[in-house]
Image (cartoon, grey):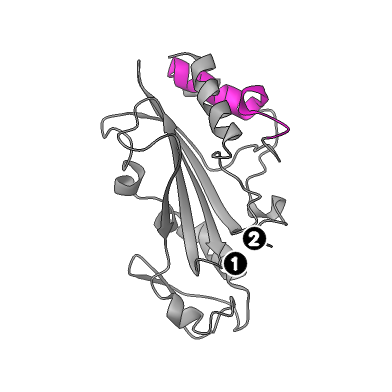
């Protein structure tokens, strides 16, 4: 298990457009998380991009897995998990705006909405995310769906620097992924020392979701 082999998998996935895409035109980004797992012989990375997808009519947690020990599936796209239980109540007409007068229900938990009717749904979900991210993002069962249950977690990133376009900057040439590979190959999370400013907050991707 070497940094070059790890970066090679990332590059291969980039070639197939199977790396996380915060600028995806089909969903409005809401939140993101990356988690690194590994031991002496195995490694895995789980990335979540939480976003409102109008075509799917829900807030979707796009989960992607990478690694040399996946228990099912190939590296790249994995699961697309709808998070809101009561979309028919908060947007009964499919107008992509908040109908008003109802909480957003996630996993059976009602989250109060402090905004007016007619607010775009992506703004509603973005307002809820900071205080409810553990409810909106993957739980342990979802997280371990494609990786061994005994694989130790090395590092969790709630923000990082993401290339604007993987066609222009392959992962093997980008600081974030180089450091991720170093952490995984060594098992030392202290090797993640970024110098580039984090840009995974939704405000950095104004064109996402506009297709």
- As for residue 173 lying within the magenta part, the answer is yes
Residue 85: image location, x then y, percent: 38, 71
Which residue bears the numbered disc 2? 209
Q: Give the residue drawn at x 59%, y 22%.
A: 178
Quadrant location, the C terminus:
bottom right
Q: Give the residue drawn at x 33%, y 28%.
A: 152
The image shows residue 94, relative to residue 184, as above or below, that is: below
Which quadrant holds residue 124?
A: bottom right
Residue 192: image location, x then y, percent: 56, 25
Cβ atoms at labels 2 and 1 below 8 Å apart: yes
Q: Is residue 148 left or right of residue 46?
A: left
Crowdedness near tag 1: few (<14), some (14–19) or many (≥20) residues, C-alpha within 10 Å: many
Q: Is residue 169 left or right of residue 74?
A: right
Q: Is residue 174 left or right of residue 61?
A: right
Which quadrant holds residue 150?
A: top left
Mark number for residue 122? 1
Quadrant location, the N terminus:
top left
The image shows residue 141, relative to residue 3, as above or below, that is: below
Q: Give the residue drawn at x 67%, y 43%.
A: 199
- Which is nearer the eye, 25 or 91? 25
Quote the CA–CA distance across marks 2 and 1.
9 Å
Boundaries of the magenta span? 167-187
Q: Secondary structure at mark 2?
A: loop
């Amino acid at each position: 298990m070497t940094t070059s082999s790890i970066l090679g998998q990332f590059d291969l996935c980039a070639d197939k457009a199977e790396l996380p895409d915060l600028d995806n035109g089909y969903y409005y980004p809401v939140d993101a998380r990356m988690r690194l797992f590994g031991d002496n012989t195995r490694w895995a990375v789980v990335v979540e991009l939480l976003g409102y997808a109008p075509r799917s009519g829900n807030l979707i947690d796009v989960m992607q897995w990478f690694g040399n020990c996946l228990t099912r599936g190939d590296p790249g796209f994995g699961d697309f998990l709808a998070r809101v239980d009561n979309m028919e109540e908060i947007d009964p007409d499919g107008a992509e705006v908040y109908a008003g007068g109802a909480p957003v229900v996630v996993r059976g938990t009602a989250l109060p909405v402090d905004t007016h009717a007619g607010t775009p749904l992506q703004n509603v979900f973005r307002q809820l995310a900071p205080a409810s991210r553990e409810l909106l993002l993957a739980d342990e069962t979802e997280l371990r769906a494609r990786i061994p249950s005994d694989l130790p977690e090395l590092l969790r990133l709630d923000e990082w620097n993401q290339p604007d376009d993987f066609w222009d900057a392959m992962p093997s040439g980008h600081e974030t992924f180089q450091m991720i590979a170093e952490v995984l190959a060594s098992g030392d999370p202290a090797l993640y020392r970024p110098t580039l400013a984090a840009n995974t907050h939704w405000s950095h991707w104004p064109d996402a979701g506009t297709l």
